[in-house]
């Protein structure tokens, strides 16, 4: 190395990524360099705890002065990279990473609702969330009712009660790709003064950023598109910083009330009160911390989000259109196809891009579905969505098997319906695999 000084100023690296484009922020937002070695990729902070500088420093950290780290159940530097990156991409004020999407939904809602409270959700949601509501939330004393037609204000008004503390929805539900008009749902939530929590797993912030359309909180199963590799579970909760807690007629004790007469989260952190309460009073208590290694895998995945999504989308549109005209196919549920009832909404709100998880109904009912699935070779039979590999599943006999026949019928989960999660492989290879399986 030369000791010579350059005859010009050497530019310092950029670390504030506000104002840069989505594609730049997905690579850089939240990153930091190892100041010891100069390692360019943010190192993995494998540690459960952090040394306190002194007795007084420990007291300061526990009393919430400054931002010093305490213990990795609450915050970890590797997790913070993913948190800052996702908060930046979703346009939120702060994010909290947790061990799975289910943990994210649970923590996001339990910071708003407690025993005796009520949540209203749109009806078409991930089957695991429906089971979470019906089983665990019911045991916690939190009840959930559903709205089947989100465009019907009267239906919302009938279901919302004074005990309703959150409205929940998804952007692109699976398996039916029956995309939701989240701008309409936010108007309902605003009118009633209730925070709106949106699961944006299937769309990802590349397709839609719910906070821009009036959502207050966004959750993800980051296991899916955000990671893309399918190698590890993770979840995230993003605070939009948008909800007017003090202005709502409803009370949110965890956020608005201090402990023992002390200041509340809202007093201390006006724009991130929800995130602080969720991190410190729900995630830290219950403990679904994301391992630093999985945090690292998550922010590595996010770096290529937009590139992967472009391929997921173009493959899906080509495959959905091809399937629709196949003689062995009864129907295709994909909002990107002109005949779909949500086509106009997909164009207006989602820029014509309705993701890569949708369903195809093959002829021959369950027997046809069985033959089709058993004949796939490139596309994997498995329950996951949103990784680079294409996957297929028969919801009626797997994810939705515990539902009553009546509920399955109402949700449109018919015996011949197959969920596809289209990956980033070559589209012709995927079509050849689907064709061979359909003809089998
Ligand atoms: C829309 C949606 N939300 C949440 C989850 C739960 O996420 P995880 O499996 O990471 O717990 C899933 C999982 O499939 C999902 O599809």
Image (tube, grey):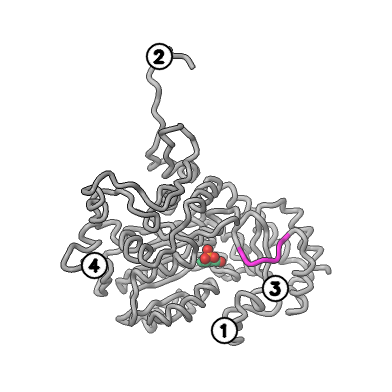
Q: Secondary structure at mark 2?
A: loop
Provide the residue designation for mark 2.
5
In this view, the residue in front, 188 or 219, is 219
Q: Position of residue 63 (x, y in %)?
A: 23, 56
Q: Secondary structure at mark 4?
A: helix
Q: How far, Cα to Cα, is label 1 from label 3?
A: 18 Å
Which comes sooner in the sequence, label 1 or label 3?
3
Splitting the image into 4 quarters, where does residue 387 fall?
bottom right
Q: Position of residue 204 (x, y in %)?
A: 51, 57
Q: Which residues are magenta?
A: 379-384
Q: How far, Cα to Cα, is label 3 from label 2?
A: 69 Å
Judged by depth in the image, the label closer to the viewer, 4 or 3, is 4
Provide the residue designation for mark 3.
361
Judged by depth in the image, the label closer to the viewer, 1 or 2, is 2
Q: Residue at x 50, y 39 (%)?
A: 41
Residue at mark 4: C-beta within 8 A of ligand 1: no
Q: Residue at x 39, y 13 (%)?
A: 7
Q: Position of residue 348 (x, y in %)?
A: 50, 60
Which comes sooner in the sequence, label 3 or label 2?
2
Tag 3 and tag 2, C-beta contact below 8 Å: no
């Amino acid at each position: 190395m030369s000791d010579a000084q350059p005859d010009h100023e050497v530019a310092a690296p950029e670390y504030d990524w506000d104002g840069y484009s989505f594609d730049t922020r997905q690579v850089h937002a939240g990153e930091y360099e190892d100041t010891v070695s100069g390692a360019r990729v943010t190192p993995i902070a494998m540690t459960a705890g952090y040394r306190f500088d002194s007795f007084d420093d420990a007291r300061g950290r526990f009393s919430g002065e400054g931002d010093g780290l305490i213990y990795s159940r609450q915050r970890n530097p590797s997790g913070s990279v993913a948190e800052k990156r996702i908060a930046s991409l979703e346009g939120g004020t702060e994010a909290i990473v947790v061990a799975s999407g289910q943990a994210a939904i649970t923590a996001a809602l339990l910071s708003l609702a407690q025993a005796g409270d009520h949540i209203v959700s749109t009806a078409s949601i991930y089957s695991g969330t429906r089971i979470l509501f019906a089983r665990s939330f019911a045991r916690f004393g939190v009840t959930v009712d559903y709205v089947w037609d989100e465009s019907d204000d009267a239906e919302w008004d009938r279901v919302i009660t004074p005990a309703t503390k959150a409205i929940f929805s998804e952007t692109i539900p699976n398996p039916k790709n029956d995309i939701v008009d989240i701008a309409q749902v936010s108007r309902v939530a605003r009118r009633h003064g209730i925070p709106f929590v949106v699961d944006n797993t299937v769309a990802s912030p590349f397709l839609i950023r719910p906070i821009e359309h009036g959502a207050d909180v966004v959750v993800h199963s980051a296991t899916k598109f955000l990671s893309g590799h399918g190698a590890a579970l993770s979840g995230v909760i993003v605070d939009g910083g948008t909800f007017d807690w003090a202005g709502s007629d409803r009370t949110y004790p965890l956020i608005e009330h201090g402990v023992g007469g002390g200041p509340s989260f809202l007093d201390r952190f006006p724009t991130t009160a929800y995130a602080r309460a969720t991190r410190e009073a729900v995630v830290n208590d219950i403990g679904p911390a994301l391992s630093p290694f999985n945090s690292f895998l998550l922010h590595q995945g996010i770096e290529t989000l937009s590139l992967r999504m472009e391929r997921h989308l173009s493959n899906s549109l080509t495959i959905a259109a091809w399937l629709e005209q196949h003689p062995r196919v009864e129907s295709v549920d994909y909002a990107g196809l002109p005949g779909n009832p949500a086509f106009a909404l997909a164009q207006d709100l989602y820029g014509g891009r309705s993701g890569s998880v949708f369903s195809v109904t093959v002829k021959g009912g369950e027997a046809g579905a069985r033959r089709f699935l058993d004949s796939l070779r490139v596309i994997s039979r498995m329950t996951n969505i949103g990784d680079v590999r294409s996957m297929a599943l028969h919801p009626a006999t797997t994810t939705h098997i515990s539902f009553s026949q009546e509920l399955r019928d109402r949700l449109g989960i018919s015996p011949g319906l197959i969920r596809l999660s289209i990956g980033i492989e070559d589209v012709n290879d995927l079509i050849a695999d689907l064709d061979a399986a359909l003809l089998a």
